[in-house]
Amino acid sequence: MACYVLPVVGAICADSYSGRYRTIRNFSLIYLAGNTLMCIAAVPVLDHNPILLSFLALFLIAVGTGGLKPCVAAFGAEQFQLPEQKELLRYFFSVFYFTINLGGFVGMIVTPIVRKAVSCFGDDTCYLLGFGFPAVLMLLSILLFVLGKNFYKLKTPKKNVILEFIKCSSYALGQKRKLSKRIRQEHWLDYAKSNFEMKLIKDMKIVFAILLLFVPLPIFWSLFDQQGSRWTFQASHMDASVLGIQIVPDQMQVINPAMVLVLIPVFDKGFYPYCEKKNILKNPLHRMALGGMAAGLSFICAGILELVLETTYPDVPQRNRISVNVINTMPCDVTIWNSLDKERNLESGNSIRFRNILKHNKTSYKLSVNAPKNCGNISLTNKNIQVQKTLEESQEDTFIISYDEIKQIRSYLTDPIDSTKSISGIPKIRIDYVKNTNLLQNITVTFRSSSGLEDMYFLGTENQDFGVIASPYMEIPQGVYECVISSGNNNRDYEKHFHLAFGGVYSLIITENHGKVEFVKLFTTSAPNSINILWQLPQYFLISIAEIMFGVAGLEFSFTQAPKSLKTVTIAGWYLSTAAGNLIVIVIAHVFKRQAYEFFLFAVVIVADMVIFTEMASGYHFVELEVDSSVLIVNQSKIEEEDH
């Protein structure tokens, strides 16, 4: 959020002190310093604090970005001769936005590839190269920018406009408080006429009128910026397989800049010329309002998709409820009785789940297991068992039914199940090893993928009593794995193939008896994601349309309507609205338990917000810059009459 607050600092420097060229150059160097520090922090062999260095690097990058944001667009736009090149200026903002999205698109694709393609310092990936690549590009861009200095129109501020702006505002407010009862002025800034130039007062009236229109804008940015948070989280609950290729949920963010790159020429060469012929969407404010409505539609799509996804989410125990999971590793069927539920039959090698049982006022529950005396090829010496368990609210208990070395039926309580899926969507798995004897020691479980990669997990059992040894949950990339179970004397005691699917949560149950691995089965705790990630395309398409209509038009409006001496200030105000939008997301986050309701709320809010914005825009008086840079205020209706 800091990079959207700090544009105010860049605006002050550009409009009051160093001018836009020097401000861009200086803040670019700060940005480069941040990139360089990130590279240093990524070198583990250096004796430094990587967390502190990374924090400092990110701070410098935020400062550099903040200083650049209000200046780059304004500096590029002021190279045009107005009003003669007014149409070219409009295309400039489209090209400017195009290049921003092109950079984002290339960066999102190339940087991860560069980072993963090369290994360094003994790691599988090379973060030094990942951070170094943009640092080199930034250095090249600074050099190119400086080399072009002789071709630019360079303007240096003649006075501290920002200071005059603050003085005039303060004086006008003070005079209004003193004189408003005796003297009525048309505008509150008119109270400063006695001490300040009329040119400054007129310019300030325009700036305040523009900034007033910016008040509703944070709502749009609160929607737009959720692509990297809420929408990515939504993607992690979807099937990320596209044409046989597995993509990462984060990569869906590439869709937005890719669509913007395609749609900008379509809008500039097709849609907007058509609208001009039909005499609609003739000014930036109209385009911004329609863009906001498109953002609302995108969130309606996101909300509908979320409602569908909710039907596939894990059934996690809610408040005042519990779930009980029973796994039968016996070679015969058993009968399960739960004091909180009814009696059920459980087949050999299967599991049964008592879902979301209401706790009522009870503090514990009983579980009874009955098996036939002749269980498969085993003659049980004790075929009944009953256990009592304290109720833990919102918890899922898991009992593994097995038998010990003297052929008594046993019930083992393992660690509570975590049914929630990983944020990244990568499959989660844990291993539950049931130890019935001391004949097998130091069990190692190896998962070997078809590509030859191995994940090895050691279950130290030499100091463990009989019972269950549960590993923590581990994230393993999706795919088909050969599972090899071996003991301390390097024996391959068991081999089996498993398929781990994207979004799935699994428990690998292993039981040992008489020195042999007797039972191995992979149980699915939470089903893999089943709805394809491409169903997010409609919402990305609509938000990309919204960005083009809202973002490009907003930058154009911020520059063309602002007085010559305060253009960077209005663009800084534009970016400040983005920071406010991020703050709104933080405030509203977690208000609703269901994400779909939050999406629908944002859709309703943006529609209401755009209605208010349209009403405010209808009272705005557009300005035309004359050749001598003086400002002539023209009513919007007059502009439309001239266009006829």
Image (cartoon, rainbow, N blue to C red):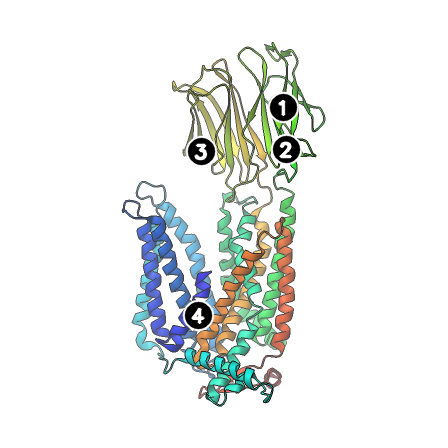
Q: Which of marks 4 and 2 is nearer the N terminus?
A: 4
Label placed on residue 476: none
Q: Earlier in the sequence, mark 3 or mark 4?
A: 4
| Quadrant of the drawing holding the C terminus | bottom right
Location of residue 343 (image quadrant): top right
Report how far apart the C-alphas of labels 1 and 2 lie in the structure. 15 Å
User: Mark 4 sits on what residue?
Assistant: 8
User: Mark 3 sits on what residue?
Assistant: 450
Single out the residue that lies furthest toward the right. 342
Percent x, y of residue 56: 35, 56
Q: Which of marks 3 and 1 is nearer the N terminus?
A: 1
Element type at mark 1: strand
Element type at mark 3: loop
User: Mark 2 sits on what residue?
Assistant: 323
Please name the amino acid that badge 2 sits on. Answer: Ser
Category of crowding for the residue at label 2, using alpha-carbon neighbours closer than 10 angstroms: few (below 14), some (14–19), many (at least 20): many
Report the residue at 45% width, 23% height from top.
485
User: Mark 3 or mark 1: which is in front?
Assistant: 1
Q: Is residue 54 visible?
A: yes
User: Mark 3 or mark 2: which is in front?
Assistant: 2
Q: Which of marks 3 and 2 is nearer the N terminus?
A: 2
Report how far apart the C-alphas of labels 1 and 4 lie in the structure. 65 Å
Report how far apart the C-alphas of labels 3 and 4 lie in the structure. 54 Å
Q: Do the residues labelled 1 and 2 touch (CB within 8 Å)?
A: no
Label placed on residue 388: 1
Single out the residue that lies furthest toward the left. 46
Category of crowding for the residue at label 1, using alpha-carbon neighbours closer than 10 angstroms: few (below 14), some (14–19), many (at least 20): few
Please name the amino acid that badge 3 sits on. Answer: Ser
Please name the amino acid that badge 4 sits on. Answer: Val
Q: Is residue 342 left or right of residue 499?
A: right
Q: How many marks?
A: 4
